[in-house]
Image: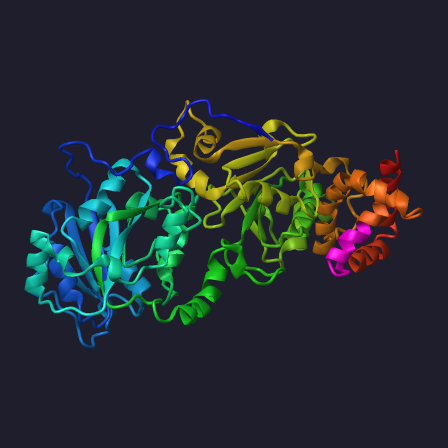
Amino acid sequence: MIPAEPRIAAPDVVFRNRWRDVFDGTLPDGWEPTLSVSVVIPAFKSKTLEYTLASLAAQDYPEHLLEVVVLDDGGGEEPVEIGEFAHPNTRLIRVHEVNDGWGRSNATDIGIKATSGDIIYWVDSDMILFRDNVRQHAKWAHFIPEAATIGDKGFIEEWDYTPEQVYAKVLDGTIADDYDRSTLHEHWSKEIYRNTDDLNESNGRNYSTHMGACATVTREVYDRTFGQDTRLHLGEDTEIAYQLWQAGAVFIPAHDALAWHMGPGTVQHQGAQVAWHNDVHFAQRMPIPRYRRKADNRIWEVPLVKVVTEVTPETAKWARPAVDRILNNTQTDVHVVLVGPWGELHEGRRRMLADPMNELYLVHEWFRSDNRVIFAEETPETVFPAPFRIDMPITAALESDSIQEMYRQMDKPWLGAIRFFTPGHDNEDAVTIWNAAVVARAKKYVTDERSLEDVVGRIAGFEWAASDAAHVSDLREVEDLDRKVVRIDPKIAELEKNLWRMRKRAEAAEAEARDLGSVSVARLTARRINAMSGGVVGRAVRGLNRILGGLPARGVRALQRLIAR
């Protein structure tokens, strides 16, 4: 691949998730915050809320820049109250007086919409925040506009506090002395921090560490998301963290933002049950990590890839074969956004065969019942929250493994974009796969002098690749557009990826082949691959050979002749 270096670097934009390169947490002398913070606390019949509010009352953050909103989610039963010790800018909203929803996500959604702070800070009602907790969270957003922070919490099982004592101890800084943090339960996120240099090497993939007990995000980033998914009643913090990742967030462990968590965490003693419940909901909404989607050939709410392509009356003749090739890829976790003048189609009288729009009618009819195809009037600005977007001309042809190859080349190094030289098309029209999270972060930094490609390159790399790298060709050069489009069996696709290994092994196998007399190099190597697969490859090859009228066998014989040379 050919790297496309950015012509002008975007100032202070974070490369991947390497926040330390922009700001390592060290504050300039005399620094004081200027961004406002909205603390949102969902509470359900909480017996510990008064301690959380008392700790917020003792924060050292400027009073005029801090507001606290408590959401009583108890439905009118055992109503929570603010109490004596609370920040002056504290409000209480009874959820049942606002809507009929319930649960943490619904309450958090109401609270965020009722506030206007530059930084959104959601806090559970069983937290005691140390005196500079808000300040330690908020400082990151002053230097990194995409900051999403998660504080450090120690899980305490027993306590003997009054709200007044909490207020006094937070105010004088002695609250930290009451427990030895080294003896407390270690949250699973700490191991991830150790393995990723505090998420510097995570590329955002460890978004699940951004949990709701004490987490912040800038409103600028949050406003790019769909907001809280109020359908969820467990795992909602992980789902919004995924959205934040796709909106361009930079995830930062705020180790100096300390707190006590009163009681065990949700997953501390019920991890297996929680995961069993959440994974079903997560699979629908979060294409990454891939292990949650345990079935192929499924239609998920949020696809891994959205392919965007435009069709006009002049190019409509290529639309059906082009989209059929997309939908028949071995990577099936794909939606297609088909942009065209669909609003001009009508049910009125027309001379169908003479109508210059007739081919568009046929395209619409061809795909109207396939809910993987989205008919759009305009090119979408974003494919959020899908993690990958492919822009391609309708006259480009993909093969069965094209999308998987593009994804593979993008995902492992976590690039910003790859543009493939596309036969028969100008560079501006070339097939391009984009990392949607990188694009979301980049857009803010685009100027007349600094293109989107420049900024994407600065954040994660922008590369060019040959058309062969993703098997992209010119559909207008295909002789038989009407032939049936068939997806290659994934096992066969995997076998084809192993053919290059046969070439590498050919020289070593040649000597052994000579000793075996009539056994050819290619046949010997193929036998080895088949043996390693337990015979699966052999059965798959024979089946494909029958389906394709002996074409694979002829290919193997050609390979034999090539090696023999």
The answer to whether residue 555 is above or below residue 539 is above
Residue 411: % across, % down: 54, 44
Residue 315: % across, % down: 67, 38
Decide if residue 223 is on the left or right side of residue 316: left
Residue 22: % across, % down: 32, 33
Instruction: Please identify the quadrant where the C terminus is shown.
Output: top right
In this view of the protein, can residue 340 be seen by the observer? no
**Residue closest to the far bottom:** 77
Foreground of the two, 259 or 465: 259
Magenta residues span 526-536
Question: What predominant SS class does the magenta segment belong to?
Answer: helix
Residue 332 sits inside the magenta stretch: no
Residue 88 lies in quadrant: bottom left
Residue 275: % across, % down: 43, 67
Seen at 89% across and 45% down, the residue is: 515
Foreground of the two, 188 or 543: 188
Instruction: Please identify the quadrant where the N terminus is shown.
Output: top right
Residue 229 lies in quadrant: bottom left
Decide if residue 370 is on the left or right side of residue 92: right
The answer to whether residue 526 is above or below residue 396 is below
Seen at 15% across and 55% down, the residue is: 176
Seen at 31% across and 60% down, the residue is: 186
Residue 535 sits inside the magenta stretch: yes
In this view of the protein, can residue 129 be seen by the observer? yes
**Residue closest to the far right:** 518
How many circles with numbers are drawn on the protein?
0
Which colouring convention does the figure follow?
rainbow
Foreground of the two, 218 or 529: 529
